[in-house]
Structure formats: C-alpha cells, structure tokens
Image (cartoon, rainbow, N blue to C red):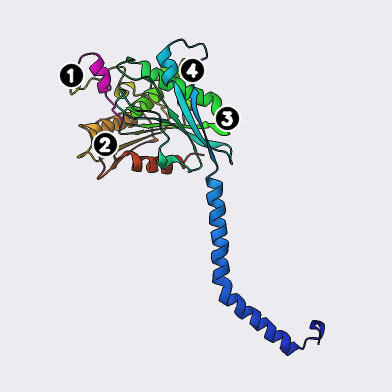
C-alpha cells in the first residue's frame, strides 16, 4: 500500500513513533543547537585586530625620546561599529613599564588603547601628563576610522596611569591644547590613583616622597563642577599603599561637594595595590554599561 493509501491507524502509529523519537533525541538536538550558537558567538567575539606602535605625535617631531615613547596599541573589534573605547595608561610610578592591553578588558566588545608615555627621570613633570593628553586627543580624532564612537571614550589606568587619567580629565588645559574639551570624555576610571601630587614629581624636586604635597599637579587641587562621570577604585585600605584609599575618599567627597553627581568610590576588600588591577578592570566593564 502506498503512503497515500495509508490507514488512519497506521498514520496515528507513525505519528506516535515520531513523537517518541523527538522526545528521545530532543535533548541531544537542543544541546547541539546550543553548542553551535555558543561556538558562533565565540567566533564572533573573537574577531579582533590589534594595530601596534602607532605614533600619536606629529611627523615633524625631532625629540628622539618622544619619538621612541609616544606610541600606542589599538585593540578593537572588527565585526562591529560604534563601540566604546577605553584609553588605558599603564602603571610604574611614572618611571617604568610599557603600554598594555589588560587581559581582563580583551574580547569584551570594546576597543582598548594602550598608551606609552615618557618616563622620569629622562622626562620631567609635566611631560608624561602632556603625552597622556596628546594620546587621548589622538583617540578622539582617529577612533572613528577603526569603527569606534568618539562620544564613547573612557580614560582609565592603574596606579601612575590612574593619576594620569585623573589629570587629563580634571585639568582641562592639557586637552585644550589639542582642541579637545575634557568634558567630552565619557568617564574616568582610575584604579588606585594617587590624588595628591605624585610622589615621583616630589622626587624630581628633591622633596621627601613620604610627605604629601597638594599643588596644581594634584587631582585634589583640580576639583571643579561638571567633570566627566568618575569611578574611583582602590584596594583594601589595610593592604593598599599608605593613605591611597583615604586620598581617593577625600577626592570623592570634594567632587561630590562641588556638585558632581555621577562620582562613585569602591574599595575592593582583600586586594592590595598590585592585585587590585584585575578586579578593578571587571568593575570598569560593569560600570561603563550604564552609558548609552
């Protein structure tokens, strides 16, 4: 008998057979589809490119040390546009280390720009801050070429890099030299920043590095209204560098009293100055999600 002449009883039996088959293998099919979807997402998320050692200074620069140090790496997604960008300044006390793309910020749908800047003692204050500002200005002017949204630029860093992030965002004069309004920065995320005048600047002046100074090179002296939204992150006050949490707490209070509503401070219990960077980056990613 052909299928067209199939009896009702036979048809019903076939239907139940099919239903039982689907019940038996439904979980396998769902797992297979889920695996395919996860693999597709992973492949999609992994589509990143890195452009290394891009100079952010003019072609007419003659200073050999500037030419050596003033460069950056751009880590960006190639499969999306209008993405957020985090400009990241490395730590090292303004005296050492190299540009980096923190692993905690990689493959997260954002671009990360790791910046080199001149270091003390070969360069003296405010050279490193001027370099930091020039790098941020470069990102504002060029990130759209890579698919990024120039209205979604965040400035962050750890330790000395966090100090630079605050200086560039709070003292508008540094970016004004490059035609950029510091208030256009979408957010500042300094992780374990020194908010008094940096101890390396005191060292350059021959001052006691243990005695705080608050002058025009201290974020604490640059408090004003309408700064970009700011997320101050520190390690455990009992494990951090001396008074590091308290300096940030003081800055937080002053910024609030100046009328800045979107300012937050977070102390990470159990983490010291070095280990705070990794969870700090995770907090950074969570915090920037609030901005459209």
Q: Which residue is mark 2?
A: 273
Assess disc 2: are there few (<14), some (14-19) or many (≥20) residues with their C-alpha within 10 Å of its C-alpha.
many
Work out whether residue 85 or residue 76 is closer to the camera in this orientation and state it. 76
How far apart marks 1 and 4 lie (CA) works out to 34 Å
Label 3 and label 2: CA atoms lie apart by 34 Å
- Distance Cα–Cα, label 2 vs label 1: 21 Å
- In the image, residue 16 lies at what x, y percent? 65, 83
Name the residue beneath numbered marker 3.
144
- Placement of 252 over or under 207, stated as above or below: below
**Image: magenta residue range:** 193-208
Residue 256 image offset from top left, x and y in percent? 33, 32
The local secondary structure at tag 3 comes to helix
Q: Nearer the viewer, mark 4 or mark 2?
A: 4
Residue that carries the numbered disc 1 in the rendered image: 208
Mark 4 sits on what residue? 57
Task: Identify the mark nearer the N-term, 4 or 3.
Answer: 4
């Amino acid at each position: 008998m052909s299928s067209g002449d199939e009896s009702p009883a036979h048809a019903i039996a076939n239907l139940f057979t099919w239903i039982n088959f689907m019940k038996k293998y439904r979980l396998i099919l769902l797992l297979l589809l889920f695996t395919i979807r996860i693999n597709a997402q992973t492949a999609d998320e992994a589509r990143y490119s890195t452009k290394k050692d891009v100079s952010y200074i003019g072609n007419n620069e003659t200073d050999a040390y500037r030419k050596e140090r003033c460069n950056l790496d751009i880590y960006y997604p190639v499969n999306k546009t209008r993405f957020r960008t985090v400009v990241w300044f490395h730590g090292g006390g303004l005296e050492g280390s190299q540009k980096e793309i923190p692993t905690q910020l990689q493959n997260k749908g954002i671009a990360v720009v790791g910046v080199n800047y001149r270091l003390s003692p070969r360069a003296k204050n405010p050279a490193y801050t001027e370099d930091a500002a020039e790098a941020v200005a470069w990102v504002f002017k060029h990130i759209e070429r890579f698919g990024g949204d120039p209205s979604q630029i965040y400035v962050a860093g750890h330790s000395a890099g966090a100090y630079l992030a605050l200086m560039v965002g709070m003292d508008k004069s540094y970016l004004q030299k490059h035609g950029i309004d510091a208030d256009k920065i979408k957010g500042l995320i300094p992780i374990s920043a020194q908010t008094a005048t940096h101890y390396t600047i005191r060292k350059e002046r021959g001052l006691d590095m243990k005695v705080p100074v608050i002058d025009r090179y201290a974020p604490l002296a640059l408090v004003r209204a309408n700064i970009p939204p700011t997320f101050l992150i520190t390690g455990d006050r009992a494990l951090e560098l001396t008074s590091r949490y308290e300096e940030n707490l003081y800055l937080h209070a002053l910024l609030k009293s100046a009328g800045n509503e979107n300012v937050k401070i977070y102390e990470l219990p159990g983490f010291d100055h070095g280990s705070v960077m990794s969870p700090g980056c995770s907090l950074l990613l969570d915090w920037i999600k609030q901005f459209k």
